[in-house]
Amino acid sequence: MDLQAVNMNVFRVPFFRFLNFDILEVGKFHAKAEMAFDSRHIGNPIMEHYHGGIIASFMEATAAIAVQPDFADVPAKPINLTVDYLRPGVKGPLTAQATVTRKGSRIASVRVLSWQASPEKSVAEGLYHFLLV
Amino acid sequence: MSEITQEKMDQIAQMWNARGKGLITHMALKIEEVSTEAVQVRMPFNPDFCVDSDQTLLHGGILTALLDSVFGLANFVAIEGVSTMATLDLRVDYLRPARSRADVIVRAHCYRKTRHIAFNSGSIWFDNHVDDEIARGTASFALTRGKTSLFEAMTRGKP
């Protein structure tokens, strides 16, 4: 599926517009996205760090795109998630890379990494499950 | 349910109001109940947080963000002398599709606190549908303790 069509699909989702991210890459089993920093993403108003929930939301959005980039009405249905927060997300863009570790007929498991300066220095790592039926 | 001091209650209100920017302001959260046992917060419906074009289905991520925020509040209320607090990990189960335009209610508590770590759990439902839980989450937070309280850090430099 071509990138422009995927990004048009992303733009239809109100909450994805709120997050304000672009899909940079999409493949059969992965997706990569970049989110622009905005004051509405702030969790810690003193340090101006990203809210942990915004990081988890952006990672969930990227994971859903990796699972179903051509979703028709709403993005892939999430079942649950676990996130490890490793470093603070500082003011600036945040990148997420989602890899589908297993896609069965009913359930998909997706691993997501997010980082700012380099992928070796993850801001957060997550595991997400989606229901495909 | 044990009561909290008026001073702590005033600090919470001040801290909440001092947040002139950020997600919490955008979510327009209202504290409904606060004690060392549990906190309950209301989030009005906001179409920006939906995934569908009809804007009736909330994205799971906003529920995760809501739990993370309210866990922080629960820790602030339940633990004395915290200077910083960071989410270590978070697990959320989405129990039902979050399809409604009703207000969202979150109830959370700190069920164990140690010198370095706080453990939290919480639930989310739509107003007047307490039996139809839409999400449940647990988290752990890393705490640091020191001379500067979290409250002082949060309100520093404010008039």
Image (tube, coloured by chain):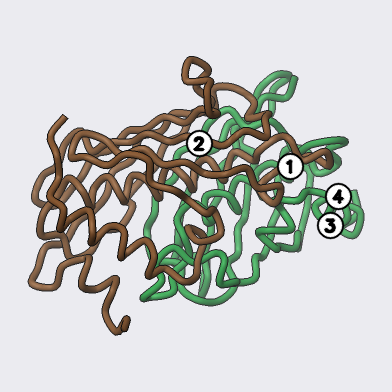
Chain colours: A green, B brown
* Discs 1/2, front: 1
* Helix, strand or loop at mark 4: helix
* Discs 4/1, front: 1
Per the model, the C-alpha gap separating discs 3 and 2 is 24 Å
Which amino acid type is shown beneath numbered disc 2? Leu
| Residue B51 circle label | 1
Task: Using the image as rendered, state which of residue A114 and residue B6 is in the foreground.
Answer: B6
Q: Residue furthest top?
A: B131
Which amino acid type is shown beneath numbered disc 3? Asn
Q: Is mark 4 in CB contact (under 8 Å) with mark 3?
A: yes
Q: Residue furthest front?
A: B6
Which amino acid type is shown beneath numbered disc 1? Val
Q: Which residue is mark 4?
A: A9
Q: Mark 3 Cα within 10 Å, few/some/many (few <14, many 20+)?
A: some
Q: Quadrant of the C terminus of chain B?
A: bottom left
| Horizontal and vertical percent position of residue B53 | 83, 42
At a point 74% along the width and 45% down the height, the residue shown is A65
At a point 56% along the width and 72% down the height, the residue shown is A39
Per the model, the C-alpha gap separating discs 4 and 2 is 23 Å
Task: Using the image as rendered, state which of residue A95 and residue B110 is in the foreground.
Answer: B110
Q: Is residue A88 left or right of residue A113?
A: left
Q: Earlier in the sequence, mark 4 or mark 2?
A: 4
* Helix, strand or loop at mark 1: loop
Q: Is mark 4 in CB contact (under 8 Å) with mark 2?
A: no
Q: Which residue is mark 3?
A: A7
| Horizontal and vertical percent position of residue A60 | 60, 45
Say whether mark 3 and mark 4 are on the same chain. yes
Per the model, the C-alpha gap separating discs 4 and 1 is 11 Å
